[in-house]
Amino acid sequence: MVESVLMQASDWISIGAAVLAGYSLYANIHSAGKRELLRWKREMVVKTTSEIIALSGQRQEFFAIRMDDWDMTCTKSAVSQFTNLRRQKYQLEIAGERELLEAADRIIELHNVKLPGLGGPPKPKEIDAKALAEANQTITDIAARITCPASRWSRMLSRT
């Protein structure tokens, strides 16, 4: 009788241990999945934001250099650069950060100039460098806040 009770208790302990191990495995996999998703989102935001800023700078430089000798080849290059800029913005839509998308839209809006050969003037207007620098800084700040929230607080504390 005592052996039977001990055997039943041992069985229940084994079952309990198996259930606990299964739950622990589930919890670890679930939290690891969330960490991986957060890590992926951070990496994607940093990569895409960096690409937007780089493309924006390249396009601004291209306009500044070629402004005086603009031709149809320049128009084709400018359209291609603009398309790449918009493509990067679409990548940010995956992150679902509204503030980041609005900042990307502002950069794209500043780059959206009428081009010669596509119904625009003989020479494109210059891109507003000051406004573009502010927009690039804004998107950088937003990306930093999204990807490194702890660093934002440490920066704020160091200002006071």
Image: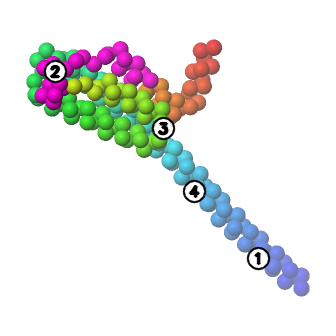
Which residue is identified by label 1? Answer: 11
First reached walking from the N terminus: tag 2 or tag 3 = 3
* Front-most of residues 90 and 34: 90
Span colored in magenta:
115-138
| Residue depth check, mark 1 versus mark 4: number of the one nearer the observer | 4
Which residue is identified by label 4? Answer: 29
Circle 1 Cα neighbour tier, 10 Å, few/some/many (<14 / 14–19 / ≥20): few
Identity of the amino acid at label 4?
A: Ile
Label 4 – label 3 distance at C-alpha? 26 Å
Position of residue 85 in the picture relative to residue 27 (left or right): left
- Residue 67: horizontal and vertical position, in percent? 17, 17
First reached walking from the N terminus: tag 4 or tag 3 = 4
Residue at the spot 47% in from the left edge and 41% down from the top edge: 96
Circle 3 Cα neighbour tier, 10 Å, few/some/many (<14 / 14–19 / ≥20): some
- The reply to whether the C-beta atoms of the residues labelled 2 and 3 are less than 8 Å apart is no
Which residue is identified by label 2? Answer: 121
Residue 66 seen in render: no
First reached walking from the N terminus: tag 2 or tag 1 = 1
The C terminus lies in quadrant: top right
The secondary structure type at the circle numbered 2 is loop
Position of residue 88 in the picture relative to residue 74 (left or right): right
Identity of the amino acid at label 2?
A: Pro
Identity of the amino acid at label 3?
A: Glu
Identity of the amino acid at label 1?
A: Asp
Label 2 – label 1 distance at C-alpha? 85 Å
Label 1 – label 4 distance at C-alpha? 27 Å
First reached walking from the N terminus: tag 1 or tag 3 = 1
Which residue is identified by label 3? Answer: 97
